[in-house]
Image (cartoon, rainbow, N blue to C red):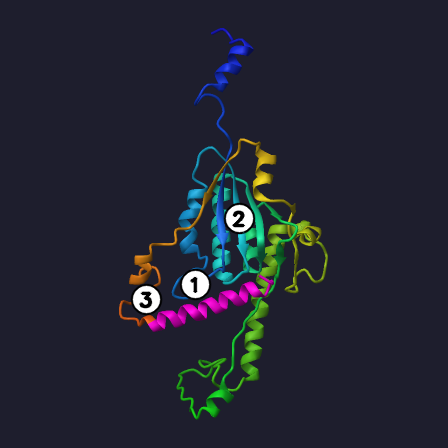
Amino acid sequence: MPLLPESVKNLWLKLPFIGEASPLVTVIELNGVIGEMGAGRKGLTFKKLEKAIEAAFKPGSLKAVALAINSPGGSPVQSRLIMSAIRRLAKEKDIPVLAFVEDVGASGGYILAIAADEIYADESSIVGSIGVISGGFGFPEAIKKLGVERRIYTAGENKSTLDPFKPEDPEDVARLETMLAELHEQFIALVKARRGDKLSSDPDLFSGRFWTGATAAEKGLVDGTAQLGDFLRDRYGKDVKVKRISPESGSLLKRLMGGEAGLSGFESPALIDADEMLAAGERRALWARFGL
């Protein structure tokens, strides 16, 4: 078969549905606190994201999967489950993963970021907070003033550990600190395994501190400063197709009936409201740590 002249070949490539397709990058949107956060279930969980992650890696002509991250952290377990699912599919499909931190990618949000082969952030993004935190309140003096007597019965001497209505027990605190230290070491090992020699030797790197994206790049927590759209056009060309994938939030009716919230049909609306208000306060506290 004779070769086509170059002019004819160029015309052929310009015809509809002929020639190379535009490069495709799917974007998984990871926005919010990680973990179950009350009746509304507004947090990021593996269960909620599993189908979205699978869909992101499904197209045959895929050039890369991008992660658009805006999270102050949350559950370490859910963070690792989501990260592991992304890494597993990236390896199976042999597809590069790129992470882009928006306002914040801290604590568990940074665990999501290290699912990527390359991490980028805006110069003003908040990145880091490689540490573990446990918080709560104590009410023993308050219930005394109200004339309330605390009655609790257990089988197992440590079953009432850290009871907020009892005075703080130094042994309870010591056990909690041991557990937090173990979780912290797991976090550090995970970051080192993913970032390796890219990390600086700064002793504050794993202290729980956080930095702007520009400083995080100097410390090796991210590979540079960039924004998702501009970066993808620079790397894959101006014709790159970007397909955003968000987890399904579920219908309002489903949430009201308990299918999404996990509540029985007999639960009082007042209890649902109280649960959601507490969850909203916790979400607000997580974002507020980073000035957001």
Disc 2 from disc 1: Cα separation: 20 Å
Magenta-drawn segment:
270-292
Mark positioned earlier in the residue sequence (3 or 2): 2
Contact (Cβ within 8 Å) of mark 1 with mark 3: no
Looking at the picture, does residue 225 appear above or below residue 270?
above
Tell whether position 5 is magenta. no
| Residue at position x 31%, y 60% in the image | 259
| Residue at position x 43%, y 63% in the image | 36
Q: Which residue is mark 1?
A: 36
- Quadrant of res 208: bottom right
Mark positioned earlier in the residue sequence (2 or 1): 1
Q: Amino acid at mark 3?
A: Leu
Q: Which residue is mark 3?
A: 263
Disc number at residue 68? 2
Q: Amino acid at mark 1?
A: Glu
Front residue of 201 and 167: 167
Tell whether position 286 is magenta. yes
Front residue of 249 and 216: 249
Contact (Cβ within 8 Å) of mark 3 with mark 2: no
Q: Residues within 10 Å of mark 2 (few under 14, many from 20)?
A: many
Mark positioned earlier in the residue sequence (1 or 3): 1
